């Protein structure tokens, strides 16, 4: 059991990702946060970085206190001032502003808010106006975890600005657990980037292994130390464990495939809330991570 | 008159590509003398905004209209803003599409007739 005498945890930012969706990232991130909050009250934050589909609040009793919009600046063209040079369209990497013959057309839902178009316009014909792309909700989860979730506006293509706004709530001095979206493309990369450690949750199947490899490569490219949690252990084969052994990646925890865990999940109860015997093992995961990061 | 036809290949005998934004090739043809150039559609690789890029490309090369089977919402908006006409054609070659344009038998579309990202390839 972790030392009860320590009253301040190493203030690490730990992201939780997977590759394959549906492996149990949110189960692990919520349970880890709740367990750490038992041990270190007021020293734990959980951030839900799956801004297209935040769901951590569904697995814990959550009380929201505050909501703030996230805005980016998008272009509005003064058609009379425009000289149709096309420099704005050339500069845009997101196809959010285009010159179609003599008309400049904007597509705000494609805009990433980079400001390049307004910057290059030689006649200052482009005004930058705010557009709401999401919101950040804050509250308390399970009575003890400082909880923040990002939520992107529906149909907004680029979610990076919401992720950035969310990550601004990572508190130095606290353990921050950041739940990532599935996959290994931009939204996941933006979430795990600069974290001190990434827990990769996988299932012991060929699908799980395939996507785990992509997630490992992403962590390596971003220089984020990482380890694996195998969830639903027993439904597949040993290939994931063998891969981890060959690659020198720690298997931090194995959660067996048990119907009662799935039933609790479906009732909105994360692992440690339904089955407190899992608190100890999750505390040990944190200790193992602290040790690995210290090396 | 210069028209753009979405194509699966680079000749007039290629089959028309049903999708506009993510078609493989764009055939820019002069309907008066059947001269043409074939452009590989760079927009096809774009994760987002393929319709916008393709519309810009054909408009800025002087086309007055586009022929394909389906046009998504961004492509349709961009083409309409530029005053380009959209014509629906399916199941034939580029040459047949051009003949149909000349004969005036093609349905002209007033707006998008496909959802965003319908043309995404795997």
Image (cartoon, rainbow, N blue to C red):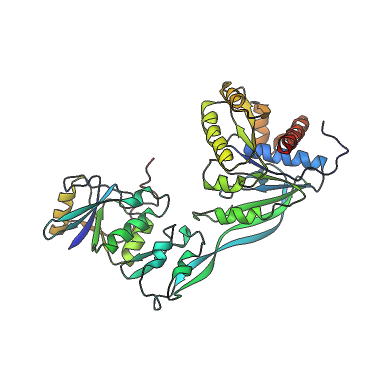
Q: Residue at x 85, y 43 (%)?
A: A7
Q: Can residue B30 be seen in this view?
A: yes
Which residue: 33% across, 67% down? Answer: B81
Q: Residue drawn 23% across and 45% down?
A: B9
Q: Is residue A112 left or right of residue A280?
A: left
Q: In which quarter of the image is the N terminus of chain A?
A: top right
Residue lying at the far left of the rendered structure: B33
Closer to the camera, A148 or A87?
A: A87
Look at the image and tell me in which quarter the C terminus of chain A lies.
top right
Q: Residue reaching furthest right? A: A5
Q: Residue furthest front?
A: A295
Q: Is residue A276 above or below residue A55?
A: above
Q: Is residue A236 left or right of residue A120?
A: right
Residue in the foreground of this view, choosing between A30 and A113: A113
Q: Where is residue A92 in the image (x, y as percent from the top left)?
A: 43, 61
- Place of residue A94 in the rendered image (x, y in percent of width and height, measured from the top left): 44, 57
Can residue A19 be seen here? Answer: no
**Whole-percent x and y of residue A170?**
70, 52
């Amino acid at each position: 059991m972790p030392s009860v005498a320590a009253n301040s945890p190493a203030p690490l930012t730990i992201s939780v990702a997977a590759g394959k969706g549906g492996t149990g990232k949110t189960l692990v991130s919520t349970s880890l946060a709740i367990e750490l909050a038992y041990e270190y009250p007021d020293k734990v934050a959980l951030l839900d970085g799956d801004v297209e589909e935040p769901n951590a609040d569904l697995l814990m009793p959550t009380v929201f206190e505050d909501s703030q919009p996230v805005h980016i600046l998008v272009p509005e063209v003064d058609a009379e001032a425009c000289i149709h040079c096309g420099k704005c369209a050339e500069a845009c990497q997101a196809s959010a502003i285009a010159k179609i013959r003599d008309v400049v057309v904007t597509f705000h839902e494609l805009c990433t808010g980079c400001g390049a178009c307004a910057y290059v316009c030689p006649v200052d014909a482009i005004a930058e106006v705010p557009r709401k792309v999401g919101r950040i909700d804050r509250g308390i989860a399970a009575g003890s975890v400082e909880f923040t979730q990002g939520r992107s506006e529906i149909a907004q293509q680029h979610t990076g600005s919401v992720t950035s706004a969310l990550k601004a709530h990572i508190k130095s001095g606290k353990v921050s657990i950041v739940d990532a979206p599935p996959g290994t493309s931009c939204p996941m990369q933006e979430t795990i980037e600069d974290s001190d450690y990434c827990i990769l949750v996988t299932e012991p199947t060929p699908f799980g292994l395939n996507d785990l490899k992509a997630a490992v490569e992403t962590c390596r490219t971003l220089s984020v130390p990482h380890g694996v949690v195998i969830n639903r252990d027993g439904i597949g084969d040993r290939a994931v464990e063998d891969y981890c052994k060959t690659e020198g990646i720690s298997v931090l925890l194995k959660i067996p495939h048990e119907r009662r865990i799935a039933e609790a999940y479906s009732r909105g109860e994360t692992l440690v809330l339904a089955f407190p015997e899992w608190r100890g093992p999750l505390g040990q995961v944190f200790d193992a991570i602290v040790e690995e990061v210290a090396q | 008159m210069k028209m753009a036809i979405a194509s699966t290949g680079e000749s007039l005998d290629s089959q028309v590509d049903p999708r506009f934004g993510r078609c493989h090739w764009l055939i820019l043809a002069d309907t008066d003398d059947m001269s043409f150039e074939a452009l590989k559609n760079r927009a096809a690789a774009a994760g987002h905004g393929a319709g916008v890029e393709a519309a810009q490309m054909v408009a800025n090369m002087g086309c007055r209209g586009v022929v394909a089977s389906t046009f998504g919402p961004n492509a349709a908006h961009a083409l309409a803003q530029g005053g380009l006409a959209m014509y629906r054609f399916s199941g034939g070659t580029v040459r047949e599409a051009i003949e149909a344009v000349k004969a005036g038998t093609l349905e002209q579309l007033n707006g998008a007739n496909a959802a965003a990202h319908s043309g995404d390839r795997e």
